[in-house]
Amino acid sequence: MKPATAIIDGKALRHNIDIIKSLAPNSQICAVVKANAYGLGIRRVVRELEDHVDAFGVARIKEALMIQESGYEGKIVLLEGFFNKEELLKTLSRRFDTVIHNLEQLTLLESVADKWQAEQEKGFWQRKTKIYFPINVWLKIDTGMHRLGIHPDQVEEFYRRLKNCPLVESITFISHFSRADELDCGYTEKQIQVFENASRDYPAQRSISASNGILYWKQAHYDWVRPGIIMYGISPHNTPIIDLGFQPVMTLSSSLIAVRDHKAGEPVGYGGAWVSVQDTKIGVVAIGYGDGYPRNAPEGTPVFINGRKVPIVGRVSMDMMTVDLGSDSQDKVGDEVILWGKDLLIEEVATSIGVINYELITQLTPRVLIEYMD
Ligand SMILES: *Cc1c(COP(=O)(O)O)cnc(C)c1O
């Protein structure tokens, strides 16, 4: 009998990469594995995909170090760049690609480069234990998200200064959509136009599309696409994407640890929050908010047991939840319970709880066992 376990299907992961390649055949793929590969386990996901994608993207340098130390020798992109000088020096010695999105990062890079060049000219660098390499910089332009990135008017200056910097090997323009899941709002077209205008005069590669861009904005695939959630077979919005050929990669399951006869009129769980209107059987499932399953999941949120959906009743507790199996239930202690996966799409669960799919998978805690199958 298994406790809360996330089963990761490596074949489905690679299948989804093939779908992405068919959607964006002329683009390279920067597979986004930030936040521990969205909860699926970054090392293993990198190992499964390293021969199938062109780069990996992370949001924290710790994850870049981890995947390089685990043996991956290819391109790693720091999607928010380095946070301080120490991280910049690691970026240079490890040869990571980095985003630069503000003036502070640019001036820090320039000052390190000045010092590096001066030392090189004096021949000091040969004696240094740390060797720095010129790196690829992804210059982030704010095209309308208004979160990170330089103003389009600053592109000329930043580009010139990066070109002049001896620690910069090449420049790629990057931006991010804010409303790419709203197909008729007109905003994405504006962002694409701003990106075009800001970047078209330069001989540089470009990238703007994450999952929604890959699915819905073919004209914006450019040189690099940056898939995150769709690699894992999960929709970037509430409507499932299995119709487009994607396969769910994660199945989150646990087990029934008790099946109890329950009388009409009796409450279940903390606060007596749910009272049965009829005699029934209550199943107790070994997963709770201590595993990252949301405590605020309302009554009626589905789980999948023995070929059917049954509703959660009563409050989700730390280690357990209770479900109404119905009076005819034949379910037994030890039976498998699926919280989401191929049999119960995560989109349905997220909609029922009122969260986004991204939150459900990234909030799983280290207590959940991760198992890989092929
Ligand atoms: C997280 C992230 C992505 C991937 O987003 P999805 O919606 O999961 O595809 C792509 N690019 C950047 C810069 C990101 O931070």
Image: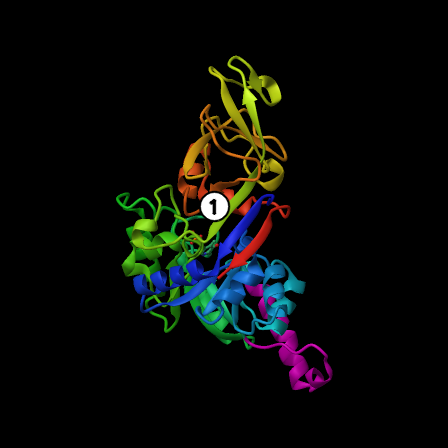
**Image height of 76 relative to 269, above or below:** below
Name which residue lies at 40% across and 48% down. 236
Relative side of 261 to 86, left or right: left
Is 172 displayed left or right of 273 in the figure? left
Image quadrant where residue 364 sits? top right
Amino acid marked by disc 1: Tyr
Q: Position of residue 315 (x, y in %)?
A: 56, 26
Colour mapping: rainbow
Instruction: Tell me the chief SS of the magenta region.
Output: helix
Determine if the C-beta at disc 1 is less than 8 A from ligand 1.
yes
Task: Identify residue for label 1.
Answer: 358
The span picked out in magenta is 105-134
Q: Is residue 123 within the magenta segment?
A: yes
Identify the residue shown where x is 32% and y is 69%. Answer: 26
Please tell me which residue lies in front, 191 or 319. 319
Q: Is residue 198 visible?
A: no
Q: Nearer the viewer, residue 128 or 64?
A: 64
The answer to which quarter of the image holds residue 240 is top left
Residue under the point 66% across and 78% down? 131
Classify 175 as above or below 350: below
**Count of number-bearing discs:** 1
**Callout 1 crowding tier (Cα within 10 Å): few <14, some 14–19, many ≥20:** some
Q: Quadrant of ligand 1?
A: bottom left
